Amino acid sequence: MKLLSRQQIEALSRFKSETYLTTSFFLNTDKSRFSKKEILVSAKNLLAVGRARLESLDLGKDKKTSIGRDLDKIADFFSQNMTANSQGLAIFSCQGEHFWEDIHLPHPPRDRVLFNHNPYVRPLSQILGRYRRICAVLIGRREAKWYNVFMGEISFIESLTSDVPGKIKEGGFEGAEAKRIERHIEAHLHDHYKKAAQRTFELFKKDQFDWLLLGCEDSFYSDLELFLHRYLIDRLKGRLKAKLSDPVDKILKETIELEEQLHMAEEAEGVRRFVSELEKGGRAVSGIKEVLRRLNQVEVQALLVTHNFTAEGKICPRCKFLYLEEAVCPSCQKKTNALSDVVDEAIESTFRSHAEVKHITPPSKLDHYGKIGAFLRYKI
Ligand SMILES: [Zn+2]
């Protein structure tokens, strides 16, 4: 199935087995970046990571057998199902309970495989969190149409048609008569715009969309403040070129492009603020080593991490502190365990301390700062 809503994620997270663990498997299947063959290779590699981890786990025989069957079933799935046109896949499996869900994702996740008591749904929440509920409104001189756009899908909400007379032709009327007709048309047009704006506000009160995108006549746009409620102006994120007569696919395409641009602009702004904070010696650090040190001290307010950046590292089994290469925990002198991806643990640790994680799409300026950085809670 497709990832569509928060309810779907909540339903998944409610699954729990008293006897077995659940395997959560995430794979980047972005076909614009990887060939089918490369995707199959990364699936195989990730399954190998899973099998190695399973070997090293100190679990009862039944639990291990169930996880082993999860990994076998995932391998089968990839050998049969590589046609789907999604950017990523999430698979949750607990064969001991005959539980299986494969979910197609609209955005690539970090590659990972985990065994937990519940389906590990945080990556799904992260992906869902990327998307805004968008209301796309097209307002012409006689008509208006409203659409919902969410996670790359568009749905028509409703339309409005008003009785606005057409513009008068040059030379048809003279002087006062022409002016009178013009005023008459203007009054109708003004009414139509008011109705369209009012209806948009009613839809907003009902659906609370995050962003408003507007395709409209210049005469509406130049008097925007006159028509649109202040709440709507706050949510207005851009102007669409699409016309009322355009097919719905064209409206969707333009909306998605605009959404992506806005998202990239938000990311770029986050990186810009980070670099400026870093360069003035403010509350920010860069590079995996320094980020881990600050995470261990619970000083991180927000983590910036390049999408799919990974690094090997260590974790102290006692204090859970994260390190790049310490064989022994400097804090408690216990021998550390190896981690195949310390960045993944760093992201988890950030969430546990209720700090924010911002995923940055490469290439970005963050690449020059070791692909990872953090805003800090306190002055250094
Ligand atoms: Zn320790």
Image (cartoon, helix red, strand yellow):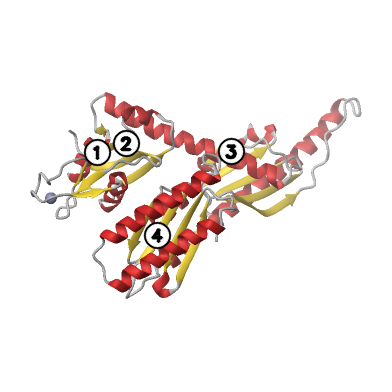
Neighbourhood count class around disc 4 (C-alpha, 10 Å): few under 14, some 14–19, many 20 upward = many
| Label 1 CB sits under 8 Å from any ligand 1 atom | no
**Percent from the top left, x then y, of residue 261?**
53, 35
Checking the image for residue 24, the label placed there is: 4
In the rendered structure, the answer to whether residue 190 lies left or right of residue 42 reads right
Q: Looking at the image, which residue is at 88% across and 26% down?
A: 170
Question: Relative to the observer, which residue lies in front, 192 or 38?
Answer: 38
Q: Which residue is mark 3?
A: 257
Q: Which residue is mark 2?
A: 372
Q: Amino acid at mark 3?
A: Glu
Q: Are marks 1 and 4 in contact (CB under 8 Å)?
A: no
Give the foreground label among 3 and 1: 1
Q: Which residue is mark 1?
A: 291
Q: How many numbered markers are drawn?
A: 4
The image shows residue 141, relative to residue 336, as above or below, that is above
The mark that comes first in sequence, 2 or 4, is 4
